[in-house]
Amino acid sequence: MNAQADELTIRRYVAQILGRLERAVGIARAADACAGAGFHDKAVEITSDLMLPLRDATTLVNATSQINRPDPD
């Protein structure tokens, strides 16, 4: 890729990472509220919803780190 395409891709990936992490924060806050109110089973159930946005964010971080790396030739 050229430098301009790399920059655009990185900006898009970072925006997507932020979106996934914001979603995860919302889920964590809901779980925290449930736990604070004594609904521990529900808190545990809600935390399972963290897996997808965190996995997606991790995948995007890994993809971002691969952009603009020199070839290992």
Image (cartoon, helix red, strand yellow):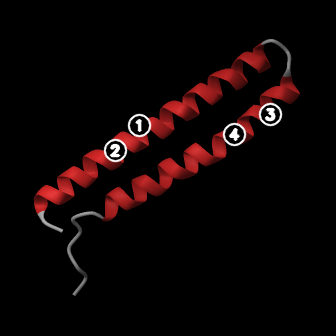
Residue 44 is left or right of residue 60, and the answer is right
The amino acid beneath tag 3 is Val
Q: How crowded is mark 1: few (under 14 residues within 10 Å), some or many (20 or more)?
A: few
Give the number of the mark in front: 3 or 2: 2
The amino acid type found where label 2 is placed reads Val
**Do residues under tags 1 and 2 come within 8 Å of each other at their CB atoms?**
yes
Above or below: residue 20 compared with residue 68: above
Q: Which amino acid does label 1 sit on?
A: Leu
Q: Label 2, on which residue?
A: 14
Amino acid type, residue under disc 4 in the picture: Asp
Q: Is the residue marked by circle 3 packed among few (<14), some (14-19), or many (20+) residues within 10 Å?
A: some
Q: Which of marks 3 and 2 is nearer the N terminus?
A: 2
For residue 54, what is the image quadrant? top right
Q: Mark 3 points at which residue?
A: 44
Q: Earlier in the sequence, mark 4 or mark 3?
A: 3
Residue drawn 26% across and 45% down? 11
At a point 12% along the width and 60% down the height, the residue shown is 3
> Can you name the residue that lies furthest to the left here?
3
Contact between labelled residues 2 and 3, with CB atoms less than 8 Å apart: no
* Residue drawn at the location 85% of the way across and 25% of the way down: 40
- Residue at the (34%, 49%) spot, across then down: 13
* Label drawn at residue 49: 4
- How many angstroms separate mark 1 from mark 2 (CA)? 6 Å
Residue wearing tag 1: 18
Label 4, label 3: how far apart the Cα atoms are:
9 Å
